[in-house]
């Protein structure tokens, strides 16, 4: 079974995370497939909008820990970093449909989407510190500006999960509907976008994002370097090993 499904119709590229048995946890191969699809859509004039969706019960549990532990430390050319670079600079409208858990990168990727629709079962969490790591995807820059410092600190320092209602209140998502309706709503909104002139869509998105483009790219590069360094340190090794062994991590010596 293919872990990433892509379908293009009516000017819309739909990317579906299709690894439900593993909670749509993302592997290096999946990051590459998504980045390839978005790169192709960016270059294809017949594609006007892209949609990223998971399943009605799960969006993404974040990185596949087993794959993550076996992969080299992230660099500018790693599949995950390439994915984040591509999604953050995608020039056309990007819509996300989120149901169930959105963990780690499952939440941070939404910061680079233009429209996000969520099921009332959606739950967002950013457990980077709990894993002995630091934020990624520019989230250390974007989240405080979106949520305010204190709420961002709860999300990033404590790793406290937050609900769809909170995500709506702070502006991370656009609307909450029952899970069975989320994908259809995202598709309807994508159809509305696809009916508009492409040059106007691309220019308007560029104008909205241009003030943040340079600082976000700079912060993402800084996060990547620190993330790779911290991944090799005792706290991350203990956290990730404890996760694989289904036990509570002990950070007393970290």
Image (spheres, rainbow, N blue to C red):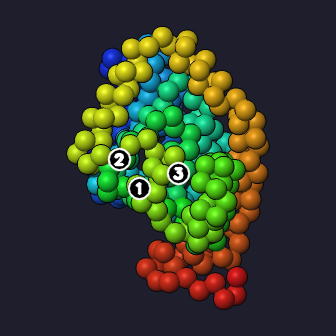
Q: Quadrant of the N terminus?
A: top left
Measured from the top left, where is residue 188 in percent x and y?
A: 31, 28
Question: In this rendering, is residue 122 above or below 190?
Answer: below
Query: Which image quarter: residue 231?
Result: bottom right
Can residue 128 be seen?
A: no
Q: Which residue is mark 2?
A: 176
Q: Position of residue 197 (x, y in %)?
A: 48, 10
At x 56%, y 36%, the residue is 87
Q: Are marks 3 and 2 in contact (CB under 8 Å)?
A: no
Q: Is residue 98 above or below residue 89?
A: below
Q: Residue at x 44, y 28 (%)?
A: 50
Which numbered circle lies on residue 170? 3
Q: Are marks 1 and 2 in contact (CB under 8 Å)?
A: yes
Q: How many marks?
A: 3
Image check: 165 left or right of 198? left
Give the mark nearest the N terminus, 3 or 1. 1
What is the CA distance from the residue labelled 3 to the residue labelled 2? 13 Å
**At 30% across and 46% down in the image, what residue appears?**
177
Mark 1 secondary-structure assignment = helix
Circle 2 sits in a helix, a strand or a loop, which is it? strand
x and y percentages locating residue 161 in the rendered image: 47, 65
**Earlier residue among tags 3 and 2:** 3
Residue 165, disc: 1
Q: How far separated are the C-alphas under marks 1 and 2?
A: 8 Å
Foreground residue among 29 and 46: 46
Indicate which disc, 1 or 2, sits on the residue closer to the N terminus: 1
């Amino acid at each position: 079974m293919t872990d990433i499904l892509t379908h293009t119709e009516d000017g819309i590229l739909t990317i579906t995370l299709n690894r439900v048995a593993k909670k749509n946890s993302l592997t290096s191969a999946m990051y590459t497939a998504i980045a390839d699809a978005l790169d192709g859509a960016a270059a294809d004039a017949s594609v006007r909008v892209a949609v990223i969706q998971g399943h009605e019960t799960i969006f993404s549990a974040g990185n596949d820990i087993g794959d993550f532990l076996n992969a080299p430390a992230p660099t500018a050319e790693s599949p995950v970093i390439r994915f984040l670079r591509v999604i953050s600079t995608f020039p056309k409208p990007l819509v996300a449909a989120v149901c169930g858990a959105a963990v780690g990168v499952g939440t941070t990727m939404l910061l680079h989407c233009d429209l996000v629709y969520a099921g009332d079962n959606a739950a967002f969490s950013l457990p980077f510190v709990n894993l002995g790591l630091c934020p990624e995807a520019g989230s250390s820059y974007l989240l405080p500006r979106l949520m305010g410092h204190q709420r961002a600190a709860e999300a990033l320092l404590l790793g406290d999960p937050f609900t769809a209602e909170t995500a709506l209140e702070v502006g991370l998502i656009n609307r909450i509907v029952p899970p069975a309706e989320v994908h259809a709503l995202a598709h309807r909104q994508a159809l509305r976008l696809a009916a508009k002139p492409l040059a106007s869509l691309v220019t308007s998105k560029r104008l909205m994002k241009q003030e943040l483009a340079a600082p976000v790219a700079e912060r993402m590069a800084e996060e990547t370097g620190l993330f790779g360094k911290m991944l090799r340190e005792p706290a991350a090794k203990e956290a990730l090993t404890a996760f694989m062994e289904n036990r509570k991590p002990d950070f007393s010596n970290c």
